Amino acid sequence: MKTALVTGASKGIGRATAITFAKESYAVAINYNSSEAEAEKVLEECNKHSEGNIIVQADVSQEKDVKSMIEKVKESFDSLDV
């Protein structure tokens, strides 16, 4: 299964992108910064189309958060395609 990490995926373009990847059978890592409830809704929508989706909190302007996010993605997915 192909995998994708989408930053800012709890709203707007990021949300639409995450759902589109799920519709194409990707497992999606849904990144959010402060909108966990919205990220959960995106996860629910993605789960209608593909399996293995996760949500991961990170402020992408903070290097330590990005490193932590990547580690969580690596733990969940064998590889990262997008």
Image: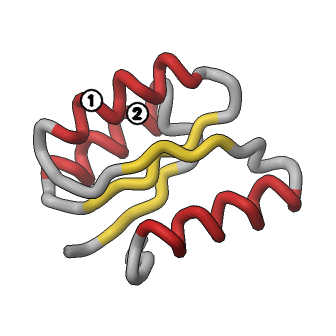
- The answer to whether 14 is drawn above or below residue 26 in the figure is above
At mark 2, the secondary structure is helix
Residue at image position (60%, 36%) is: 32
**Residue 79's image quarter?**
bottom left
Residue under the image location 59 percent in, 63 percent down: 72
Compared across the picture, whether 75 is left or right of 58 comes to left
What type is the residue that disc 1 sits on? Answer: Glu
Dividing the image into 4 quarters, which one contains the N terminus? bottom left
Task: Name the residue: 41% across, 49% down.
Answer: 54
CA separation in Å, label 2 and label 1: 12 Å
- Give the residue type that dot 2 points to: Arg
Classify residue 51 by image quadrant.
bottom left
| Residue 40 vertical placement versus 69 (above, below) | above
Q: Is residue 1 left or right of residue 14?
A: left
Residue 74 vs residue 14, the one in the foreground? 74
Relative image position of residue 29 (x, y in whole percent): 44, 54
Report which residue position mark 2 lands on.
15
| For residue 62, above or below residue 41 | below
Q: Which residue is mark 1?
A: 44
